[in-house]
Amino acid sequence: MLEEEMTVDGIGPLTLISADVELNQAAQAEGLLTDDPNQHP
């Protein structure tokens, strides 16, 4: 719901930044964007 409100308000989608693979998978299952800082050299 928060992400929908942010998008409607023009703020943009919420992105979870985490190196925890399981946490990222759970966030993605809930429709959040994720970014793993370990994937950026």
Image (cartoon, helix red, strand yellow):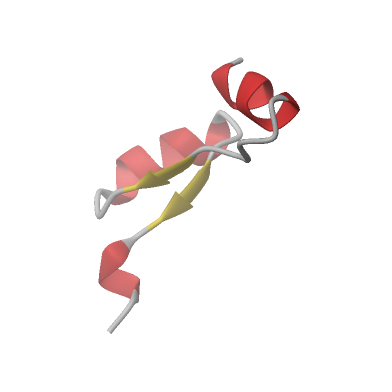
Residue 35: horizontal and vertical position, in percent?
A: 41, 57
x 46%, y 35%: residue: 27
Residue under the image location 32 percent in, 43 percent down = 22
Compared with residue 1, is residue 6 higher up or lower down, i.e. above or below?
A: below
Which of 26/36 is in front?
Answer: 36
Q: How many marks?
A: 0
The residue depicted at 65 percent of the width and 19 percent of the height is 5
Q: Position of residue 16 (x, y in %)?
A: 40, 42
- Residue at 68% of width from left, 23% of height from top? 4
Above or below, 18 against 29 in this view is below
Residue 18 in the figure: left or right of residue 3: left
- Splitting the image into 4 quarters, where does residue 24 fall? top left
- The spot of residue 33 in percent (x, y) is 54, 46
In the depicted structure, whether residue 7 falls above or below residue 18: above
Residue ranking furthest to the bottom: 41
Quarter that holds the C terminus: bottom left
Q: Residue furthest top?
A: 1
Q: Is residue 36 above or below residue 39?
A: above
Residue farthest along the right direction in this orientation: 8
Return the residue nearer the eye: 22 or 10. Answer: 10
Q: Quadrant of the N terminus?
A: top right
User: Residue 36 at what x, y percent from top left?
Assistant: 34, 60
Whether residue 32 sits left or right of residue 16 in the image: it is right
